[in-house]
Image (cartoon, helix red, strand yellow):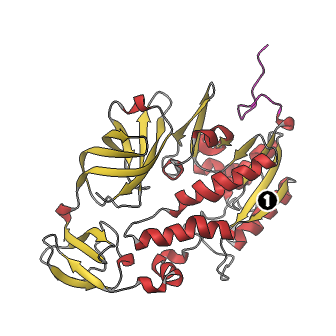
């Protein structure tokens, strides 16, 4: 007789299934913990202490702050589940902050949330979960995972405004088989309603908006703190190589940016390229920003090569739209993307994520990091 699967797709009764829930202290992960407890699972909540600048306040809009840890503890107490705090400041500094700083110094525009998921969350926390002999690691990310046979695939969440698949493209196949994302089939307002019914203290808590180590979005001050020598003046050049101005440090600029150039011109000027080797920025008019070809490095594939034989969809920034493209894979480590139409503001350091529409939804095929051509 075939065994019945529980709601997580495992051949166990909920009470015999141990799960770790990554609890950030926000409404999403708290609701997930509440749902797992309500369904009868053996739940352990784990909160990561990642960063502390000594200025945390109760109204912080940053994730992983001291207030978030207290909120997670209160939720765990309310639910009657075991709760652990892991102090990962050193791991976070090495795996995320240092990478963030170095990326900007190279003239790139990094995405620390992808690095955070790739390192401390889906690597270190996953290892801890297995050491605790948990059957699955559960998170509050808005993304769907569908298991067919022995293969788990990732899909965009049904709430496209909350979908976080772009930030999870680097998740490996092995990790996907162990991870579960219960909120992928819900809308945000539904999550909050469940939190209210569970009487959780975070039901009305605002979503985190800032990167945890970049308060108020002031990333330049963060880079200056860790690398004070980074703010060096350099040339601003036009596309013909003429020096037309001076900048106060390449970390102030990213491809597609208009603000801060301060060079008089008949038409507005935009950053077309950041050349870290020469400490220069190259600027041009808006019509010079468009690109069709993108080079990618360090790609991660979640699908077979056969799925790339025809045109697919790509996303080149977290808030961007899906674009039709053809992908040319090279040795499964790099790729060339040819877009159907010109796209502005394609910046090295950002991710290009691959999607394909099927009968279930938008399947994530993987992705890679945009590099200079």
Q: Is residue 228 left or right of residue 185?
A: left
Read off the magenta span.
1-13
Q: Is residue 5 magenta?
A: yes
Answer few, some or many: residues within 10 Å of disc 1's Cα (few below 14, many 20 plus, some between 14 and 19). many
Q: Is residue 371 above or below residue 247?
A: above
- The residue that disc 1 covers is 75
Q: Is residue 211 left or right of residue 257?
A: right
Q: Is residue 124 above or below residue 258?
A: above
The answer to whether residue 249 is visible is: yes
Residue under the image location 81 percent in, 51 percent down: 44
- Residue 191: x and y in percent read 65, 49
Q: Is residue 66 above or below residue 46?
A: below
- Residue 84: x and y in percent read 81, 60
Residue under the image location 35 percent in, 77 percent down: 250
| 190 or 214, nearer to the observer | 214
Query: In what quadrant of the picture does the C terminus appear?
Result: bottom left
- Residue 166: x and y in percent read 48, 50
The quarter of the displayed image where residue 207 is located: bottom right
Q: Is residue 151 magenta?
A: no
- Residue 86: x and y in percent read 76, 63
Q: Which residue sits furthest front? A: 331
The secondary element bearing badge 1 is classed as: helix
The quarter of the displayed image where residue 278 is located: bottom left
Residue under the image location 29 percent in, 83 percent down: 234
Q: Is residue 313 left or right of residue 68?
A: left
**Which secondary structure class fits the magenta region best?**
loop
| 290 or 105, nearer to the observer | 105
Q: Is residue 176 left or right of residue 249?
A: right
């Amino acid at each position: 007789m075939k065994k019945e699967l529980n709601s997580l797709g495992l051949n166990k009764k909920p009470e015999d299934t141990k799960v770790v829930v990554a609890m950030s202290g926000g409404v999403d992960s708290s609701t997930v913990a509440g749902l797992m407890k309500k369904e009868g699972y053996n739940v352990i909540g784990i909160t990561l202490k990642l960063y502390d600048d000594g200025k945390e306040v109760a109204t912080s809009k940053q994730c992983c702050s001291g207030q978030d840890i207290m909120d997670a503890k209160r939720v765990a107490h309310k639910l009657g589940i075991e709760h652990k705090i892991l102090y990962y400041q050193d791991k976070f500094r090495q795996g995320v902050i240092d990478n963030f700083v170095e990326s900007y110094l190279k003239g790139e525009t990094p995405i620390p949330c992808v690095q955070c998921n790739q390192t401390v969350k889906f690597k270190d926390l996953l290892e801890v979960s297995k050491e605790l002999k948990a059957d699955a690691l559960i998170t509050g990310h808005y993304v769907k995972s569908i298991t067919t046979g022995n293969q788990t695939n990732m899909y965009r969440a049904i709430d496209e405004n909350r979908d976080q698949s772009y930030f999870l493209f680097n998740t490996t196949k092995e990790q996907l088989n162990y991870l579960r994302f219960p909120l992928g089939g819900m809308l945000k307002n539904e999550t909050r309603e469940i939190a209210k019914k569970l009487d959780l203290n975070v039901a009305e808590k605002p979503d985190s908006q800032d990167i945890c180590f970049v308060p108020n979005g002031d990333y330049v001050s963060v880079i200056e703190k860790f690398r004070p020598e980074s703010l060096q003046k350099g040339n601003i050049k036009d596309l013909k190589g003429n020096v037309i101005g001076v900048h106060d440090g390449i970390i102030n600029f990213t491809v597609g940016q208009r603000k801060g150039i301060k060079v008089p011109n008949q038409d507005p000027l935009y950053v077309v390229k950041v050349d870290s080797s020469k400490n220069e920025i190259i600027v041009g008019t808006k019509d010079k920003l468009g690109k069709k070809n993108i080079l990618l490095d360090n790609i991660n594939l979640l699908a077979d090569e056969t799925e790339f034989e025809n045109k697919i969809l790509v996303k080149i920034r977290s808030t961007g739209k899906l674009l039709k493209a053809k992908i040319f894979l090279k040795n499964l480590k790099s790729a060339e993307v040819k877009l159907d139409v010109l796209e502005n503001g394609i910046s090295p350091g950002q991710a290009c994520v691959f999607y394909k529409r099927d009968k279930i939804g938008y399947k994530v095929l993987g992705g890679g990091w945009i590099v200079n051509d």
